[in-house]
Image: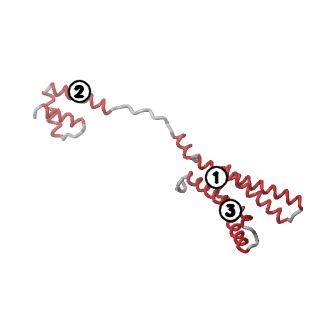
Amino acid sequence: MDCTGYRELISAQLDGEVTEVERSALRDHLNACQGCRSFEADAVVVNRAVRVVPSPVVPDQTAVIMRAMALPARSLSGDLLRAAVAALGLARIASAVALFVSVVAAGSSHTSMELAAADLAIGAGLVLVAARPELASGLVAVLVVLAGATVFGGAGDVIAGRVAWNSELLHVVDAAAALLVWRLSLRRLRSRGRIAIPA
């Protein structure tokens, strides 16, 4: 074998790819060949320079990552959803206050007073959910039952001719509130990684 072959063995040895027989033959050759010894010394320096590169300093991002995982991502669609729920809640509160005033002024029935109180409670619940979306799932069932019962009952009254259809439009608002709060609860669950739904 000539020096070219031994220099290929030097490179292979640096990569850990020589057999014991080849290593022994290379050792004998290096003892007798100054040129190949110089080649080996240079190859060792180059090999070390290429392989031993200091790793870059990476700052600890644990706290940042944990905060990002703990907090739900804010988005424009989420903010609009919360604003819509808040608007429905404030409208419901205003309606309840107006009903209270008219009940007190007219001395209406106890039932009217209780209806006004229920409207006020629902409005307050909607405003609270808009401010604290993590509470949305607790209000969904109440709103779905309310919307279902009023829409069903109102449709029956319209079909029977007891009321005009436009007097029952408020119940569509109830259904919209239930839908918005349900959607808000789904967004909250998705932000915590419990479910996967489209944005």
Q: Is residue 43 left or right of residue 103?
A: left
On residue 152, the disc is: none
> Which circle's residue, 3 or 1, is located before the other in the chain?
1
Q: Secondary structure at mark 2?
A: helix
- Which residue type does callout 3 highlight? Val
- Which residue type does callout 2 highlight? Asp
Mark 2 crowdedness (10 Å alpha carbons): few <14, some 14-19, many ≥20: few
Mark 3 crowdedness (10 Å alpha carbons): few <14, some 14-19, many ≥20: some
Q: Is residue 71 in sight in this rendering?
A: no
Q: In terms of depth relative to the viewer, which is nearer, 159 or 19? A: 159
Q: Secondary structure at mark 1?
A: helix
Q: Which residue matches tag 3? A: 172
Q: Which residue matches tag 1? A: 134
Q: Is residue 144 in sight in this rendering?
A: yes
* Residue 115 sits above or below residue 14 on the image: below
Q: Is residue 175 left or right of residue 59?
A: right
Q: Are marks 2 and 3 in contact (CB under 8 Å)?
A: no
- Which residue type does callout 1 highlight? Glu
Q: Where is residue 149 shown, x and y percent of the image?
A: 70, 68
Mark 1 crowdedness (10 Å alpha carbons): few <14, some 14-19, many ≥20: some
Q: Which residue matches tag 2? A: 42
* Residue 18 sits above or below residue 86 on the image: above
Placement of the N terminus among the 4 image quadrants: top left
